[in-house]
Image: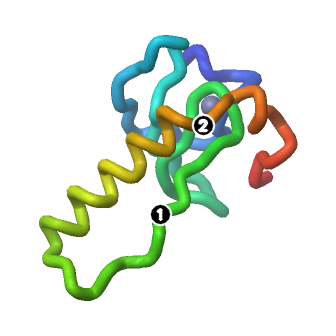
Amino acid sequence: METSGFGPRGNVEEVLGMDATGRKLVWVKREDFQGWACSRCAWAFNPAGPLVRESIEEMKTHYEAQRDQEFKSHVCAKHSGTTRPI
Ligand SMILES: [Zn+2]
């Protein structure tokens, strides 16, 4: 892994693609946090609460769309260190 020194600390269990800047969306598992995060900075995805009217399939689709959209639109420089959850 080339993520040592920056990005999410903990076990990266899964990596989803890479965008134009080379950052990756990674699934992180550690004691105090589990979820999707950026490999470059401290950004982590906080999903909106579940919508009860949706089916599981709809929820999953919306979750992934929201996650991908927020990942694409976040700016790494704005999340460097300051919002790191540890
Ligand atoms: Zn980032």
Q: Nearer the viewer, residue 80 or 7?
A: 80
Q: Is residue 16 above or below residue 9?
A: above
Count residues near mark 1 (Cα–Cα under 10 Å), then give few for <14, some for 14-19, many for 20+. Answer: some
Q: How many marks?
A: 2
For the point 65% across and 43% down, the residue is: 43
Q: Is residue 52 left or right of residue 35?
A: left
Q: Is residue 75 left or right of residue 47?
A: right
For the point 46% across and 34% down, the residue is: 25
For the point 77% across and 35% down, the residue is: 78
User: Percent from the top left, x then y, of residue 52?
Assistant: 27, 87
Q: Is residue 55 above or below residue 79?
A: below
User: Percent from the top left, x then y, of residue 64?
Assistant: 31, 51
Residue 59 got which mark?
A: none
- For the residues marked 2 and 1, what is the alpha-carbon distance in whole angstroms? 14 Å
Residue 47 got which mark?
A: 1
User: Percent from the top left, x then y, of residue 3?
Assistant: 62, 22
Inspect the image, locate mark 2, and give the three-letter code of the amino acid beneath it: His
Name the quarter showing ligand 1.
top right
Inspect the image, locate mark 1, and give the three-letter code of the amino acid beneath it: Pro
| Extreme residue in the bottom direction | 52
Residue topped by disc 2:
74
2 vs 1, front mark: 2
Q: Is residue 60 left or right of residue 33?
A: left
Q: Is residue 19 above or below residue 46?
A: above
